[in-house]
Amino acid sequence: MHIFRPLSKMALKRDYVNESMIHDFVSSAASAGADSGELPEEELSAGEKFKPDATQIAAVRFAVSRWFAIINGGAGVGKTTVIKMIVRGIRKLFPQLHVSLCAPTGKAAARLKEASGIEASTIHVLLGSRGGDVFSAGALEDRALIADEASMIDSALLAEIVKRRPARLVLVGDQAQLTPVGHGQPFHDIIGLYPETVRTLTKCYRNTEAVFQAALKIREGNLPVRYAQSENERWCVVAAREPEEAQEVIRAWAKEGYLDFETDIVLCPRNGKRPEGGGEFPLGTVNALNEELLHLSREARGLDRGEKFQSGDRVINTVNTPEEQVWNGTTGTVQMVNDAGEVFVKLDVPVRGADGEMKDSVKFTREMVKNLQYAYALTIHKSQGSQYRKTVMV
């Protein structure tokens, strides 16, 4: 433990060490001056479908010219476009630096790569994760790192980045999103403690879409409309007085084929625990819904033979397995289970194997299978950084 005697407070020593490293890095960067260099707007925005606005261009120039910067903003404000322009700016002014894009999860990294057209990896891959808290990557002094979905990065992981002293570090995220599952909330704290390192984008380019309008109402503390439809989105509120009623609605949708769990998801606030002494999971929780939706899915496939995992089951991995490039939060669909109890999973997001080739299927050994759970329903934390065709929120 580390004791803060003047404040009569204490913290785990590792948390104190991690956050001290982050503080030292950010405070040094905040006090440093900006690097000079010309970044014409037409060069930054070359190839973009839409003309960036003045705040986006200013945010790009700010991020490129400093050791450390945060780009903050909600959905639809053009953060991915800004990332692409930051890459162009760094490559123009600092051609000696290698630019690396990364994100906390495989899904977020894949989406970043798809949207930006630039290779991206998970932070764990970038740092050479060897499992647990062991990372093999050396100094990053010749690199400019841009981390997307940075609100999800906990203090331990950000400390692993900053102690390698990247030449440039840009964190991109949304302050309004949930804080990390792990210890600390560095993205949120830095915004509050070092506002001079932050540029916040506020102009939304998707502000006419139905889900955005509903989410904005909720964020403002108001009730959203019951139903809305826009060009690309549909929003609907279905009344349910009790968890039992909510679960019955979801059960009916699943039976009718309204939900396809290859592309859709049910989100819940909590996992739910069985009562002491046994019994059923509380209705309306992740575990209760997974039990029911698994049964309905297997019933539709005619495959309910009693084994824990069967072909077609939706699963999520819960422990990092670096040697297979499979991480906590990796999702997929069971392809087959062999006689040795090994489970072959088709991943939702392909990964790069040890041979450098992309692969979309991974064999989970009997030991790795212990880390698999069903994934018809997830907590909101587990789903952060993902995208789905339909989302049902309980």
Image: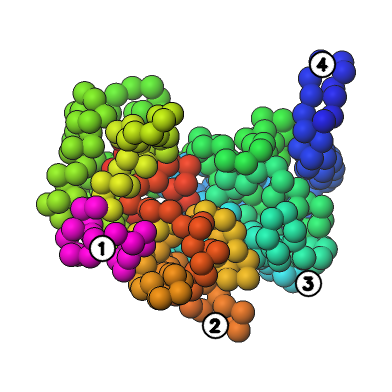
Q: Amino acid at mark 1?
A: Arg
Q: Residue furthest right?
A: 5
In whole angstroms, how far apart are the C-alphas of marks 3 and 4? 45 Å
The residue under label 2 is 357
The residue under label 1 is 305
Camera-side residue of 120 and 196: 120
- Quick check: 171 left or right of 28? left
- Quick check: 295 left or right of 181? left
Q: Assess whether mark 3 and mark 2 are in contact (beta carbons under 8 angstroms).
A: no
Q: Assess whether mark 4 and mark 1 are in contact (beta carbons under 8 angstroms).
A: no
Dot 4: element: helix
Q: Quadrant of residue 325?
A: bottom right
Dot 3: element: loop
Horizontal and vertical percent for residue 139? 83, 63
Q: Amino acid at mark 4?
A: Leu
Q: Quadrant of residue 141?
A: bottom right
Which numbered circle lies on residue 7? Answer: 4
Dot 1: element: loop
Q: Assess whether mark 1 and mark 2 are in contact (beta carbons under 8 angstroms).
A: no
Q: Amino acid at mark 3?
A: Gln
Give the mark nearest the N terminus, 1 or 4.
4
Above or below, 254 against 11 in this view is below
- Magenta stretch secondary structure, dominant: loop
Please tell me whether mark 2 or mark 3 is closer to you in this view.
Answer: 2
Please tell me whether mark 3 or mark 4 is closer to you in this view.
Answer: 4
Please tell me whether mark 2 or mark 1 is closer to you in this view.
Answer: 1
Quarter placement of the N terminus: top right
Q: Is residue 142 magenta?
A: no
Which numbered circle lies on residue 96? Answer: 3
Q: Is residue 300 magenta?
A: yes
